[in-house]
Image: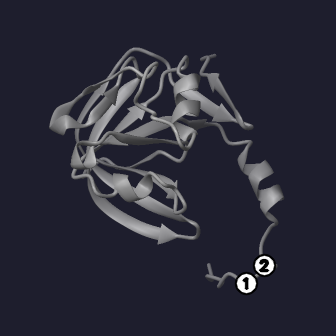
Amino acid sequence: MTAHAYEPGYGVDADGFRTALAQHAAGVVIVTARPEGVPVGLTATSFSSVSLEPPLVSFYVDRSSTTWPWLRLADYFAVNVLAGNQHDLATRFARRGIDRFAGPTRWHPGPFETPLLDDVAAHLICVPHTTVDIGDHTLVVGLVVECAAGVNRPLLYHRGRYGRFLPH
């Protein structure tokens, strides 16, 4: 496959691209950290497993994010896989200009003082492994050093809305 340099007008238009991507259901996570003792976090729907050996996960963050400059300072970060009933939390951590960790958010310090959100489907504690600027986002890859899974079903994001997973 030949790589093409991006040229204005090459490829699809942004609205059509966004509409097509909305057909893909994605899991919802909140990435949290505590650089310089201050808890920070953001919502991501781009979370993915990367590798089993070594255990790597990834997510993308918009380069215009006001949280990313703080998050990238952390020695550890947590990926909180949200449970199906935590759509309000996903919305809260996607908003700007609020204290995301104030009530009604419930959380506690986890390993390495990483903020862990309560009642999530799973937690993964990571150390930063790799970051790469790609387009208007930054790819963040983390090496998982601890993890725990709960019993809750995950929250999903599809067509601009949150929902729950229902097995067949």
- Say if mark 2 contacts mark 1, CB within 8 Å: yes
Say what secondary structure mark 1 lies in.
Answer: loop
- Decide which of 117, 13 is in the foreground and name it: 117
Picture coordinates of residue 164, whole percent (x, y): 61, 20
Three-letter residue code for mark 2: Tyr
In the rendered view, tell whether residue 159 sits above or below residue 5. Answer: above
The residue at which mark 1 appears reads as 7
**Residue drawn 75% across the image and 53% down it:** 18
The quadrant of the image that shows the N terminus is bottom right
Question: Residue shown at 54%/31% (left/top)?
Answer: 92
Left or right? Give the position of 168 relative to 130: right
Indicate how the structure is coloured in the image.
one colour
Q: Position of residue 104 (x, y in %)?
A: 46, 18
User: Which amino acid type is marked by label 1?
Assistant: Glu
- Quarter the C terminus occupies: top right
* Mark number displayed over residue 39: none
Q: Is residue 86 left or right of residue 101?
A: right
Task: Tell me the residue at 31%/36% (across/down).
Answer: 124
Q: How many marks?
A: 2
